[in-house]
Amino acid sequence: MSIKQELLDKMVWAVVGATDKTDRYGYKIFKKLKEHDYTTYGIHPKLEELDGDKIYKNLTDLPEKIDVVDMVVGPNIAIGVLEEAKELGIEYIFFQPGSYNEEVIKKAEELGLKYLEDDCIYATLINME
């Protein structure tokens, strides 16, 4: 089974970089995951809620263990989230375009995380419709 299929089979996701700006991927991905019946949590340090859903400041605040972290933030933020994910026992990371660089990928490998890069969950879900 491909890493992409492994990720798609996991049903509890956190979108790091969820936003209430409807033209941004942080919003579109959050909504699209929910439309496809994924349990989806938004992560944003300054946002309280998004269309009626509670938004959390970080992964540690989430009410349940999640399966996949979807990164919709810059590499400078993503690298810190990797440590938090590892500490919480989260092993799957989906890097959206622009959320990673060589340093971030190296860190994910050092932490033993399973990840996907050069792909977009939003496009994938739309193609499944």
Image (tube, helix red, strand yellow):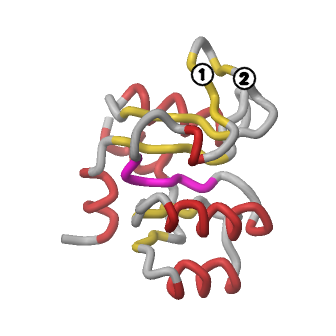
What kind of residue is marked 2?
Glu
Percent position (x, y) of residue 107? 61, 82
Q: Is residue 7 left or right of residue 21?
A: left
Percent position (x, y) of residue 63? 46, 33
Up the image or down, 129 lies above or below 123; here it is above
The residue singled out by tag 1 in the image is 54
Q: Quadrant of residue 78?
A: bottom right
- The kind of secondary structure element at disc 2 is loop
Which of the two residues, 83 or 124, is positioned nearer the viewer here? 83
Percent position (x, y) of residue 126? 42, 40
Which residues make up the magenta segment? 66-71
Q: Is residue 27 left or right of residue 126?
A: right
Q: Is residue 104 left or right of residue 121?
A: right
What kind of residue is marked 1?
Lys
Task: For the N terminus, give its image quadrant.
Answer: bottom left
Name the residue rendered at 37%, 42% in the picture.
12
- The kind of secondary structure element at disc 1 is strand
Up the image or down, 42 lies above or below 53; here it is below
The residue singled out by tag 2 in the image is 48
Q: Quadrant of residue 101?
A: bottom right
Name the residue rendered at 30%, 42% in the picture.
11
